[in-house]
Image: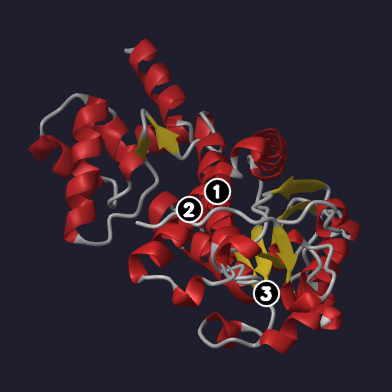
Amino acid sequence: MTTHSPKGQGVAGGRSDARETEWRLDRYAGLEGWAVEEALGALQEGQMRAVAALLPAMDQLTVAVTAAIETLRGGKGRLVYAGAGTSGRLALLDGTELGPTFGWPDERLVFLMAGGEAAAAKAEEGAEDDEDAGREGIARHQIGAGDVVLGVAASGTTRYTRALIIAARGAGATTVGLANNPGAPLLTDAEYGVLLRTGPEVLAGSTRLGAGTAQKAALNMFSTALMIGLKKVHLGYMVDMLPTNEKLRQRAAGMVADIAGCDLAAAGAALARSGDRIKPAVMIAAGAEPAEAEALLGQAEDDLGAALAAFRAAR
């Protein structure tokens, strides 16, 4: 495999652009003439750089997740995902998976996508410049104190996303901005900015590549750490998961059996008595009556570990 050495940094289209994600690297200028193996190697190299961009962002992610946990813990606040284009679709994907994975209620989840729902499947590129639509989304959903708004934009300059985050922050919401360019205004528009500095793309300006990969990883990390902080994980298990198919029902029974220390038959019976809810099923399998399980979980603010400890101490 031929090695193509870096030759410095060019600029896309021969024009100056302060956004690193728009720059062209001379290293990849002849990419279209490379063999498929070489092109794939270049793309893999870009993906590895994208994942590495998460490490310098860890402190910012930690602060943002901690703030989100404090905002949403014990309340009725909503988690709001916002963006345009690829960034918006990645945000939509992350949020959509929180219901089945962690039992996050639909009524506590809001998606604000430039161009509306249709833009999830068909590009609506002009919609990203509509600042009024961004502000209108915040007003329509009455987003404010107690809500967490997560805005994602590779450039960090997307007018729709910026207007939305500024409006949400002004309304008292906890706001987080993810962007891939240093100095991006979105990072300061939001109360908590997270810079994922992925640099120029293998294909100049194609932020669905490296920038998108870093965003997907950061969203995975943000939402999962948030759900851990909200006590939806116990002993490494997703104990608010919704067992909606046979595979997940088997997984749920295995969780109950392992945590409660019973066999799979007893775990299945406990799940049936709990309405297929894992946390009360664990309590029932451990010896609690259904009403007692609900009461203990309520007293423990839905913390399964604390509820189990209280039940066992009382026994």
Q: Position of residue 177 (x, y in %)?
A: 74, 55
Q: Amino acid at mark 1?
A: Arg
- Which label sits in the foreground, 1 or 3? 1
Q: Where is residue 280 shown, x and y percent of the image?
A: 34, 39
Say what amino acid the circle numbered 2 marks: Glu
Residue at 66% across / 61% down in the picture?
A: 80
Please tell me which residue is depicted at 17% across the width and 48% down the height of the picture. Answer: 250
Query: What label sits on residue 285 in the rendered view?
Result: none
Residue of label 1: 49
Q: Mark 2 vs mark 3: give the one in front.
A: 2
Dot 1 or dot 3, earlier in sequence: 1
At x 65% / y 57%, what residue is drawn? 78
In which quarter of the view is residue 88 placed? Answer: bottom right
Near mark 3 (Cα within 10 A), the count class, few <14, some 14-19 or many ≥20, is many
| Spot occupied by residue 204 in the image (x, y as percentages of width and height) | 64, 70
Which quarter of the rendered picture does the C terminus lie within? top left
Q: Residue at label 3?
A: 84
- Where does the image place residue 63, in percent across and percent down from the top left? 72, 35
Mark 1 touches mark 2? (CB < 8 Å): yes
* The label number, if any, that marks residue 45 in the structure image: 2
User: From mark 1 to mark 3, how far is it between C-alphas?
Assistant: 23 Å
